[in-house]
Image: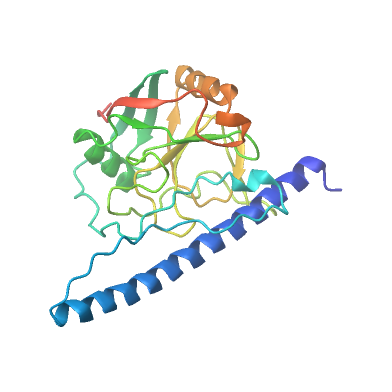
């Protein structure tokens, strides 16, 4: 017998999948459109003309399907910009046998995230490289979800879910949360810190999410760290305060700004 809670989660996952399909379709349409625009501009420039065009090149979302649970909107997936450069990830510069701490000072309190380089070397190396150059400093945690899944999402320099470092890193440590159940999901326990992505393999950038309450998700988001007890309390307080306007997915009512982030070796 399927319980109401199981049914709600099933609806959430189904809508999450539809949302990812819409986003992928929108990205493909944007690429096709941009190819045509580029061709037209090339022709005009070749003939000695000039073109001034204000064209949005972002990977926008499609219209939302309101026939399933609104909890499905809660996916830890950024909307990466189509114009984002495809730079290589940072050169490996960490000790893969060591442990590191992703230390974040926020206006709501400090967060300490334990990271294991042996399990997630690419992720740890990327975060250290970004933190060392102040990439996260002054950015805000732009998204909170309070239904279906329970996460606070951060790491976007644009603050709107579309930003990234200009490169992607491979998925890592995906089997650490166990085998997916019949519903295709595993439990990301409270305190887990994982990478956001576009729903496609190997699309992680700089956005990450902090789980403040046990959450069921597909095992496709790299779990790379764990909040300590005091840090989890900070995120729980943000979750308890809710989302702006009383929604279940959006900017947190209790705004969170990353003032300083460092990744020291333990």
Res. 83 in view: yes
Q: Residue at x 59, y 30 (%)?
A: 245
Q: Is 261 located above or below residue 77 in the figure? A: above
Q: Residue at x 25, y 53 (%)?
A: 89
> Residue 124's spot in the image, x, y percent?
31, 40
Q: Is 233 located above or below residue 143 in the figure? A: above
Q: Residue at x 33, y 53 (%)?
A: 169
> Residue 148's spot in the image, x, y percent?
65, 40
Asked if residue 266 lies left or right of residue 213, the reply is left
> Residue 228's spot in the image, x, y percent?
45, 22
Picture quadrant of residue 42? bottom left
> Residue 36's spot in the image, x, y percent?
34, 77
Q: Residue at x 46, y 16 (%)?
A: 230
Asked if residue 16 lies left or right of residue 116, the reply is right
- In the rendered image, the quadrant that contains the C terminus is top left
Asked if residue 132 lies left or right of residue 119, the reply is left
């Amino acid at each position: 017998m399927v319980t109401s809670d199981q049914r709600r989660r099933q609806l959430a996952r189904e809508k999450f999948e539809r949302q990812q399909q819409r986003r992928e379709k929108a990205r493909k349409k944007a690429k096709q459109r941009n190819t045509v625009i580029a061709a037209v501009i090339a022709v005009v420039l070749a003939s000695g003309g000039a073109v001034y065009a204000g064209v949005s090149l972002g990977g926008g979302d499609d219209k939302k399907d309101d026939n399933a649970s609104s909890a499905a909107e809660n996916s830890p997936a950024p909307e990466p910009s189509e114009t984002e450069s495809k730079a290589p990830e940072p050169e490996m510069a960490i000790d893969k046998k060591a442990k590191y701490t992703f230390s974040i000072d926020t206006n709501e309190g400090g967060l300490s995230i334990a990271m294991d380089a042996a399990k997630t070397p690419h992720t740890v190396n990327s975060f250290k490289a970004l933190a060392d150059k102040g990439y996260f400093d002054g950015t805000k945690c732009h998204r909170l979800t309070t239904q279906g899944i329970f996460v606070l999402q951060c790491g976007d320099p644009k603050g709107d879910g579309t930003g990234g470092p200009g490169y992607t890193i491979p998925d890592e440590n995906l089997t650490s949360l166990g085998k997916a159940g019949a519903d295709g999901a595993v439990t990301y326990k409270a305190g887990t810190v994982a990478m956001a992505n576009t729903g496609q393999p190997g699309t992680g950038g700089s956005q990450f999410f902090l789980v403040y309450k046990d959450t069921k998700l597909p095992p496709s988001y790299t779990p790379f760290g764990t909040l300590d007890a005091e840090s989890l309390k900070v995120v729980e307080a943000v979750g308890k305060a809710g989302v702006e306007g009383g929604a279940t997915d959006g900017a947190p009512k209790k705004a969170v700004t990353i003032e300083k982030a460092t990744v020291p070796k333990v």
